[in-house]
Image (cartoon, rainbow, N blue to C red):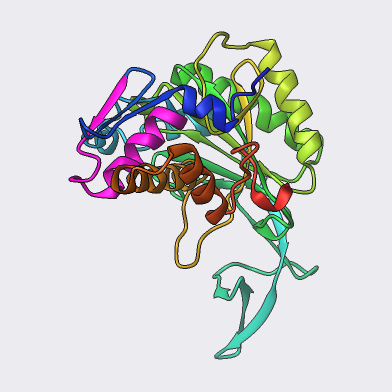
């Protein structure tokens, strides 16, 4: 049985018509493969293969950007995290230095400062929560995605998961869509973890099973675990670029599509070559090549 992130599954959902200069993915059509800028093809693939929200309108998103922040803040208490800092003397006054940045906060007697877990403006359209040592992840990072069809379901599920992870003293970070017009999306909720990945997954599976959304199409790039819960590796970034998981995979696929339209060489062969060049596992595109 094919899993949802095999090359064969991806190919079965795609139809490339060079003579008509178009690509079809699950009844969604993109025309002008070679005429339009590649970035447009990447964003289209990102929507149809990963987020699942084809109707996203940038003007609507901007108008409703972070309109759910207040609802999220009401539902969750910020526990804050304590972080070790160095001191810098400026005009006889001590200031804490965190990741090379001077912060105007008082330093505790233990040489720690408390900073918020809430990061509402870190990622446009998302509300971020950081609960990791030193505010960073150590080691290989996994991403867990939860599909949400409405803000109510998304916020409720996200808060329940975050509260459970906090109570278990697990290192993680997470974000939830804070723009109401962005729903539904396959990546409405995203959880990041490294050293505690297995425990994070167990808790997310348990929470999703309590209130699952069944029979969704889901992402073709992230691997399905159960119902509306998916998992993927943090992408290995190419030099000079920083892309999300979905954009990274979509970029590789877009390159292969354009290669095929230009050369006429077998698309499956070109796709494998491009995936490998982006450090993507050709047996399971949710994983990185280094994990083969």
Compared to residue 108, the image places residue 209 above or below, namely above
Q: In which quarter of the image is the N terminus?
A: top right
Q: In this view, does 122 lie to the left or right of 5?
A: left
- Residue 55 drawn at (x, y percent): 29, 24
Q: Is residue 120 visible?
A: no
**Residue 44 located within the stretch drawn in magenta:** yes
Q: Which of 50 and 208 is in front in this view?
A: 50
Q: Is residue 244 visible?
A: yes
Instruction: Please report the residue visible at 49 percent of the width from the left and 37 percent of the height from the top.
Output: 268
**Residue 73 located within the stretch drawn in magenta:** no
Which residue range is magenta in the image?
A: 28-50
Instruction: Please report the residue visible at 62 percent of the width from the left and 12 percent of the height from the top.
Output: 212
Instruction: Please report the residue visible at 52 percent of the width from the left and 50 percent of the height from the top.
Output: 273
- Residue 4 drawn at (x, y percent): 59, 24
Compared to residue 134, the image places residue 80 above or below, namely above
- Residue 135 drawn at (x, y percent): 65, 57
Q: For residue 85, which quarter of the picture?
A: bottom right
- Residue 108 drawn at (x, y percent): 73, 67
Q: Which residue lies furthest to the bottom in this view?
A: 91
Instruction: Please report the residue visible at 51 percent of the width from the left and 61 percent of the height from the top.
Output: 238
Q: In this view, does 59 lie to the left or right of 3?
A: left
- How many marks can you see? 0
Compared to residue 127, the image places residue 288 above or below, namely below
Q: Which of 46 and 126 is in front in this view?
A: 46
Q: Which of 157 and 265 is in front in this view?
A: 265
Q: For residue 136, which quarter of the picture?
A: bottom right
């Amino acid at each position: 049985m094919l899993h949802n992130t095999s090359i064969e599954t991806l190919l079965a959902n795609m139809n490339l018509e060079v003579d008509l200069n178009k690509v079809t993915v699950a009844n969604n059509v993109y025309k002008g493969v070679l005429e339009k800028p590649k970035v447009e093809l990447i964003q289209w693939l990102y929507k149809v293969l990963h987020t699942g929200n084809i109707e996203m309108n940038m003007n609507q998103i901007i108008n409703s950007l972070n309109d759910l922040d207040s609802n999220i803040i009401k539902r969750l208490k910020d526990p804050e995290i304590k972080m070790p800092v160095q001191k810098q003397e400026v005009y006889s006054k001590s200031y804490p230095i965190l990741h090379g940045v001077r912060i105007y906060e008082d330093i505790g007697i233990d040489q720690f400062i408390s900073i918020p877990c809430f990061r509402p403006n870190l990622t446009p359209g998302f509300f971020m929560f950081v609960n990791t040592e030193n505010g960073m992840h150590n080691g290989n990072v996994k991403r867990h995605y939860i599909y949400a069809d409405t803000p109510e379901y998304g916020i409720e599920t996200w808060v329940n998961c975050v509260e459970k992870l906090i109570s278990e003293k697990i290192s993680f970070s997470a974000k939830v869509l804070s723009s109401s017009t962005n729903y539904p999306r396959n990546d409405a909720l995203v959880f990041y973890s490294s050293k505690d990945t297995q425990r994070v997954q167990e808790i997310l599976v348990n929470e999703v099973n309590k209130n699952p959304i069944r029979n969704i199409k889901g992402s073709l790039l992230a691997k399905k675990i159960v119902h509306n819960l998916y998992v993927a590796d943090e992408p290995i970034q190419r030099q000079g670029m920083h892309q999300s998981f979905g954009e990274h995979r979509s970029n590789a696929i877009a390159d292969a599509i354009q290669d095929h339209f230009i050369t006429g060489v077998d698309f499956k062969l070109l796709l494998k070559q491009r995936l490998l060049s982006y450090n993507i596992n050709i047996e399971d595109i949710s994983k990185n090549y280094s994990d083969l």
